[in-house]
């Protein structure tokens, strides 16, 4: 065993070993730099909110200029314009159908809303099918359509902020945002938080971005009515991922995607989010790179596939090497040898120490961005219970970084060779980047959704404390209550 440790430590000090370890240092520092830049953008938004509040605008979380809220129409919601809610479900057997129906009945006199039964998809993913059916059922005068996942927690001013940006710049094709994961304590939840954090850099630009998150997308309704750029046909004919398909269309037609600095949404993860559910989520995330719309899109996805796999294992490898260096040095120490007589263990310890410093810098940068986003979310939702960093376990964050980056290439390779994925009890098969076969199990789908911990199959009519409907009902209460600035 000692011979293996010393030989491995010596090999890791070779030019190739040094390259791999120095590359790992660079990856850590680049991540830290990216999070630092994202923190800067989010911090500017916090300063703007505080300055607006100090100048007398008590509603800065809704709008920076209080004069924009003063108009002749009576405001009975935290969004001043006409608003219609469509809840789209697969069938009346969907567990959400009865719960949403009860909620809409409770608020039927206060908001314009309805539930839409989409039916089963045959040519695309069920989510895309639901979205397209919802678009078909929207009001004929609808100007903008906002797609939201059922576990997105909007701030009171989120819809108004997105709509204001669309009004300000008609050239915007899609507006998007990104979730701030709140880990529940399980390793699986920390792995999901760690997976999303590097991606969050692309959404903290304060404006133009090339990234798109399907959980929150605002678009021009007319783009769907006219099938502009093949938006509808591209999604309907074999589309698997809504955000990847629309991002590809935007890139092909040089259309603008933006992410406002206030578009960051709290996303509490399930308290019982198991490692198996995390793995299933990771499989679906890597599978999206197997879908594509054009040859250029395929090349881009292959580049993302290769780069992500290379960087993931390039991130993990130096920690394995450092572990060998430390183990070899400890064996020498306990055998009574002095480090001065063994240059290689000293070199190995120097490399391990350098990696430790880079890791601390990286974790501090991640902590700082999370802290700033938590602060921003608290400012944007002053009526909600405040979020806190107190529950974050940074040792688990570090372990999750290693686990997630180790598993990502494995998941990506499995997706590449299988060309099929199980999504909520439905198996999709791809051919030439598009869905060409859909298999549905006769049994019920999974008991839980991937992340939110929402019980999908329970007693009919029984209240569920973990349901997303609690969040929606609270939102409806805010939307129907007249505010101080009503005219």
Image (spheres, rainbow, N blue to C red):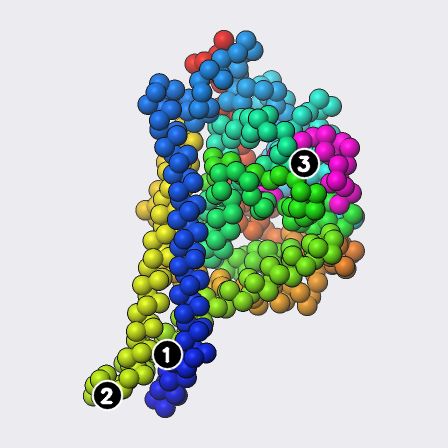
Residue 38: numbered disc: none
Residue 341: numbered disc: 2
Q: Nearer the viewer, residue 29 or 264?
A: 29
The residue singled out by tag 1 in the image is 324
Answer yes or no: is residue 446 visible. yes
Residue at position x 31%, y 63% in the image:
357
The residue singled out by tag 3 in the image is 88
Decide if residue 198 is on the left or right side of residue 128.
left
Quadrant in which residue 335 is drawn: bottom left
Residue at position x 63%, y 29% in the image:
170
Decide if residue 482 is on the left or right side of residue 216.
left
Residue at position x 54%, y 22% in the image:
79
Q: Position of residue 437 (x, y in %)?
A: 78, 56
Decide if residue 317 is on the left or right side of residue 342.
right
Q: In this rendering, is residue 244 above or below 338? A: above
Answer yes or no: is residue 184 visible. no
Q: In this rendering, is residue 65 above or below 152? A: above
**Region in magenta:** 213-234
Q: Position of residue 400 (x, y in %)?
A: 43, 60
Q: Callout 3: 10 Å neighbours few (<14), some, many (20+)?
A: many
Element marked by disc 2: helix
Q: Nearer the viewer, residue 65 or 399?
A: 65
Q: Residue furthest bottom?
A: 3
């Amino acid at each position: 065993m000692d011979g293996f440790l010393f030989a491995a430590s010596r090999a890791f000090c070779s030019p190739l070993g040094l390259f791999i370890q120095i590359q790992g240092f660079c990856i850590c520092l680049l991540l830290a730099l990216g999070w630092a830049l994202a923190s800067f953008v989010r911090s500017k938004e916090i300063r703007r909110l505080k300055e607006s509040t100090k100048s007398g605008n008590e509603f800065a979380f809704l709008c920076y200029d209080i004069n924009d809220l003063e108009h002749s129409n009576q405001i009975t919601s935290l969004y001043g314009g006409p608003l219609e809610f469509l809840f789209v479900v697969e069938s009346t057997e969907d567990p959400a159908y009865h719960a949403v129906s009860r909620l809409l009945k409770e608020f039927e006199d206060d908001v314009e809303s309805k539930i839409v039964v989409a039916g089963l998809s045959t040519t695309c993913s069920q989510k895309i099918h639901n979205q397209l059916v919802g678009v078909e059922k929207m009001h004929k005068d609808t100007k903008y359509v906002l797609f939201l996942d059922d576990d997105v927690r909007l701030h009171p001013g989120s819809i108004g902020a997105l709509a204001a940006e669309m009004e300000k710049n008609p050239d915007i094709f899609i507006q998007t945002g990104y979730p701030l994961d709140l880990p529940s304590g399980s390793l699986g939840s920390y792995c999901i938080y760690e997976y999303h954090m590097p991606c969050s850099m692309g959404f903290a630009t304060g404006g133009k971005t090339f990234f798109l998150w399907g959980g929150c997308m605002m678009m021009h309704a007319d783009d769907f009515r006219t099938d502009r750029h093949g938006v509808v046909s591209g999604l309907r004919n074999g589309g698997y991922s809504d955000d990847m398909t629309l991002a590809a269309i935007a890139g092909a037609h040089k259309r603008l995607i933006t992410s406002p600095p206030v578009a960051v949404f709290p996303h509490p993860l399930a308290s019982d989010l198991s490692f198996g559910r995390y793995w299933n989520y990771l499989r679906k995330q890597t599978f999206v790179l197997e879908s594509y719309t054009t040859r250029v899109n395929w090349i881009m996805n292959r580049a993302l596939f290769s780069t992500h796999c290379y960087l993931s294992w390039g991130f993990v490898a130096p920690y394995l090497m450092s572990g060998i260096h430390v183990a070899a040095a400890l064996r020498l120490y306990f055998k009574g040898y002095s480090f001065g007589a063994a240059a290689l263990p000293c070199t190995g310890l120097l490399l391990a120490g350098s990696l430790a410093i880079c890791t601390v810098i990286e974790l501090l940068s991640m902590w700082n961005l999370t802290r700033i986003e938590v602060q921003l979310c608290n400012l944007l939702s002053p009526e909600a219970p405040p979020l806190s960093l107190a529950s974050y376990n940074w040792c688990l964050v570090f372990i999750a970084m290693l686990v997630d980056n180790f598993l990502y290439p494995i998941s990506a390779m499995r997706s590449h060779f299988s060309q099929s994925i199980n999504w909520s009890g439905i198996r999709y098969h791809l051919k030439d980047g598009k869905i060409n076969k859909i298999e549905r199990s006769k049994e019920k789908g999974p008991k839980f959704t991937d992340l939110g911990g929402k019980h999908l199959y329970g007693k009919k009519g029984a209240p569920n404390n973990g349901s997303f409907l609690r969040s929606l009902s609270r939102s409806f209460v805010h939307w129907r209550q007249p505010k101080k600035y009503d005219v």
